[in-house]
Image: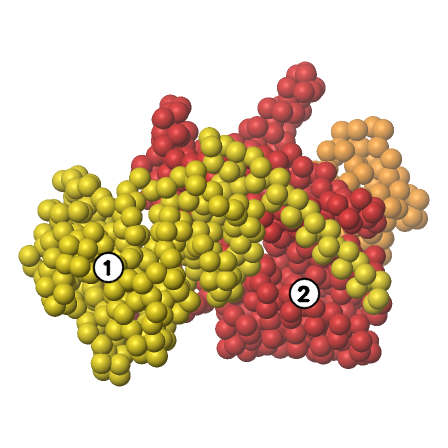
Chain colours: A orange, B yellow, C red
Amino acid sequence: MKTEEIYAQLLDVFKNVFENNSIVIEESTTANDIENWDSMTHLMLITEIETDFKIEINGMDVMNLHNVGNLVSLIERKLG
Amino acid sequence: MGQLLKYLISTCLCTIALYLILNFGMAQLYYKGQPFIFITNNYFTEKGGDTYARFLEFNKKSASNIIFTGSSRAYRGYDPLIFDEVGVSSFNLGSSGQKMPNTALIISHLLNSENTSKIILELYPKGFTDDISESDFDLITNLKDDKLAVKIALKTKDPRFINTYLTRLLFSGFNTDLPIDAEYVSRGFCKSDRVMSDETYKYLELRFSEDNSNNFNIQGIRHLDSIANHCKSENIELILVTSPVSDFYSQKNHSKLLLSIQPILEDYNLRYLDYSQNTSFSTKDHFYDASHLNYTGVKKFNKMLIKDLGL
Amino acid sequence: MLFNSFEFLVFFSILVVVYFSIAQRFRWMLLLGASYYFYMSWKPEYVLLILFTSLVSYYCGIWMHNAKTLKRRKHFLWLSLAINLGVLFFFKYFNFVNDGVREVLQSFSLHYSYEGLDILLPIGISFYTFQTVGYNLDVFYQVRKPEKHFGIFALFVSFFPQLIAGPIERSTVLLPQFKKEHHFNLERIQHGLKYIIWGLFKKLVIADRLVPIIGEAYGNVGDYSGSTLWFATFLYAIQLYADFSAYSEIAKGLAKILGYDLMENFDHPFKSKNITEFWRRWHISLSFWLRDYLYNPILFAKKKWGRPAVIYSLFITFILCGVWHGAKFTYLIFGLLQAFVLTFEILSKKWRKNLQSSAPKFFYNNLSMLLTFGFTLFSFSFFRADSFSDSMVLSKALFSTPFDFNDLFSFIKASGGIRLAFTLTLVLLFLSMDHKIYALVKNEKSSRFQKLLIFPALLAAIGMFGYFGEVEFIYFQF
């Protein structure tokens, strides 16, 4: 899967989890930039990504996530 | 580095300037007739009271037969008027909570062979610690003699004394309308007509326990030694006395006290008159609180003492 | 050596001069030696303990990194955790557990005679242990490579400004700083001094003055009414904040003079509108540490549970946060209270958001702050209470007795009367100026006005109004 496709699919997940159709994500986006981000939505986000991309994300992976760019790289790694 | 030094020095100078201005300013404010500055911290004693009156009245140049020294048990327990009756002149230089280190300084600075032939030192266990207490700040503020006040201040080795000494300077000058203790009589003695109520006795009973008594601290012994030494070289007879005690006196601490002064008693061949075990004094009749005799008790004790001293 | 002592002033001044006079490659040795010397000024033997902890973490980090399989990596992680946390547990909780065992056996009429050990808690152990555990977890999660230089690692564990009471620093942030050369910089030193002066002011003029007053109330909880106890608890919150943030700021200032940056540990916590926000503003280094090394890992380990995982993780994290402070039942209650309220906040988020959009902003914001502050005071009462039974008496009084002005008045008289009024004036001045002055402190630059007037004025105020004599910082007992 290409990086742009990942971003597109990821954006849908974000819109769904944060219930906000006007969300914008880019490489440098962090938790602080997204309204309504908390532990609950963080958890929901990760589980939704797992379901959507059919991958498994564990505790070790989560430790190194600081921004959306890290998240996309993680998804890329998990996909192949 | 040079710039850093310049910065540090200018900061220090500004700090000192502001500090002095702040002190001076606060000394001008009054609250209910008292200078406001005294409520700002715990190392201030209001100028005045019995310490001030006593040391103001005391004249280093005039002679007395006996000088009484020690804590509040001294200035409330020995009445010069009673000693007058047997032709003995005396003065009382005790002060509230006075501890050995300061007693030693007062004695060596103010008393010599010219102005007295006998010193009675009222001994009590609490007086043997080196800790800083309100007594230090009381003396620094209220002693008449500047040099002695400085000696006491320096001895505390505590930065707080700078504040205390500064207020001494700010409020210096002969000032007769300072509040004097209502119980102050003359020649250092404070007379109390108070009596011990049943309530007070019960309250003290609840609070007192041998186990909770302040632990006796032997540090003051070296000061007692220097007092004995000074008296020896000035040809003054030093007499140690423990005046009568109430039911709320720690006998444990008293035994420790006895043990620690033994060597000094022997070295200097001193008399020690211990009235703490004298059963003819009862707490309810002769005391007004846990440590102090009321005037009935003082009369009885002084007469007893005069007899025992052979005066 | 306390920060507010003459010995420390001499120690630190000499250290700064020597530090900037020697070559960079020797500086870690100087700092390590100074840090160990500083630690030994409490009890010399305990330096062996911190050395031991450093060795365990250091070697486990390297072995973890070199391990070929995940399983082996986990073994080394568990080894380091078991030893380091085991040591912490032993010193903090052994006697507590021992007493608990005795009580349980006694309820079965079995006699248990072991009285427990007479051990003194090594100062700072809770802080440096968490700092090293964080390091081992960072290496395990491959957030960083293990530190090869033992001397620098040992310095990271024992760096004296933050050794005794934090902030708890991340290895990724602090360790690299020890490898950089820091030049003598007057502006940076002046900046560091601002932190130190402000910290000393908070400690000596605000926090220490309040100690005897709070002691009067909390030492006699049965004697005072609810309104008095609320008042005393309010003062305690101020004292705790002033004392603890002072320590962190002095630590920041000391480190800054030498060239190092420590994290902010407090950010005006009483402005929080909810408890979730409170924990982002109070003891930040601890709460962020707990979030990253405990809360998130547990949360993601249990993600299959969905929402309940959040609540489960919250409870474990805050129970641990509570008991980290010590082996007292009241600390556990403190932690549980946080967990309950945080859970409530998560579950009620939508409802509160609706309330916020419909209510007038001024009303909503201030009511939120008031309620949050009120809850904070209530949970602090457990933190300060001398015993569990005291805390129960306290809680009952706080919520059942009506406002009693006479009682409050006699309390004020008993705790110093007019002197207390003066202390309160200082406290109110402090609360109103805290934000502004701290903004000045944080600013790297200082105007002439600041250098010649404001900070010297704070120093003069310390000289006049400060309570001197050794009064230990509260968080030392952790």
Placement of the N terminus of chain B among the 4 image quadrants: bottom right
| Position of residue C232 measured from the top left corner of the image (x, y, whole percent) | 45, 37
User: Residue C135 got which mark?
Assistant: 2
The foreground one among C458 and B310 is B310
The foreground one among C305 and A80 is C305
The foreground one among C6 and C402 is C6
Check disc 1 and report its element: helix, strand or loop.
Answer: loop
Q: Is residue C174 left or right of residue B228?
A: right
Q: Is residue C414 left or right of residue C457?
A: left
Chain letter, disc 1 residue: B
Chain letter, disc 2 residue: C
| Position of residue B223 measured from the top left corner of the image (x, y, whole percent) | 36, 72
Q: Are discs 2 and 1 located on one and the same chain?
A: no
Q: On the image, numbered disc 1 is attached to which residue? A: B89
Q: What is the quadrant of residue C432 in the picture?
A: top right
Q: Is residue B227 left or right of residue C271?
A: left
Task: Please name the residue shown 55% across and 74% down the image.
Answer: C40
Amino acid type at mark 1: Ser
Placement of the C terminus of chain B among the 4 image quadrants: bottom left
